[in-house]
Image (tube, rainbow, N blue to C red):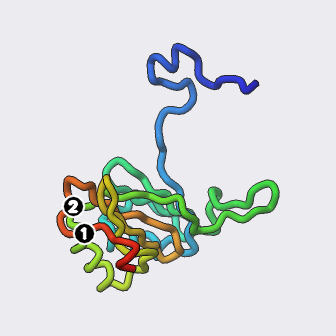
Amino acid sequence: MTEMTTTPQEQRSGEHAFVKGVHGVRYHVKDVARAVAFYTTHLGFTLKHQQLPAFGNVTLGNVDLLLSGPQASGSRPMPNGQQQTPGGWNRVVLRVNDLSAFVERLKRADVHFRNELEAGPGGTQIQIEDPDGNPIELFEPRSLSRRAAPRSAAGR
């Protein structure tokens, strides 16, 4: 049987003896300066700290995005030799308003899109990629969605 890592007191209080909060989300990138420019220019992040060429920290609201280049300690291979690389399907989700207009602006800036607008019961979303292939989801909650209509299988 697996030993619990939280005590009943920690569960009641909502505090954990070790985990104090989310420090940030790490994305592996090939070129930190290029990634910092992408997030600050296109998505409204602010540069918080950088140590080129290894690391950059950009922030939006209370979320820090930790951009680790190949030279960063957070990018070192796993003990089994597996390399940490950009990409994948886990992603940061950014809440936006007027998603359709923002998509048009990003298309004019030649930002790479993974898919088309998708509408669901909670709102509308689309996925873009940073210059290293890391996914970012742009999400407009239903209460803010105005223009995007759900796509249908027949319309594809």
Position of 47 with respect to 34 (left or right) is left
Task: Identify residue for label 1.
Answer: 148
Q: Secondary structure at mark 1?
A: loop
Position of the C terminus, as image quadrant, is: bottom left
Task: Identify residue for label 2.
Answer: 145
Image coordinates for residue 149, horizontal then vertical, percent: 25, 68
Asked whether 13 or 125 is in front, the reply is: 125
Mark 2 crowdedness (10 Å alpha carbons): few <14, some 14-19, many ≥20: many
Say above or below: 127 vs 78. Answer: below
- Residue type at numbered disc 2: Ser
Image coordinates for residue 155, horizontal then vertical, percent: 35, 78
Image coordinates for residue 135, horizontal then vertical, percent: 48, 67
Say above or below: 88 vs 65. Answer: below
- Residue type at numbered disc 1: Ala
Numbered circles on residues, count: 2
Residue 46: assigned label: none
**Outermost front residue:** 154
Q: Secondary structure at mark 2?
A: loop
Q: Are marks 2 and 1 in contact (CB under 8 Å)?
A: yes
Position of the N terminus, as image quadrant, is: top right
Q: Residue at x 47, y 24 (%)?
A: 15
Asked whether 34 or 106 is in front, the reply is: 106
Q: Residue at x 17, y 64 (%)?
A: 146
Q: Residue at x 42, y 69 (%)?
A: 127
Q: Is residue 85 visible?
A: yes
Q: Quadrant of residue 93?
A: bottom left
Q: Residue at x 59, y 68 (%)?
A: 86
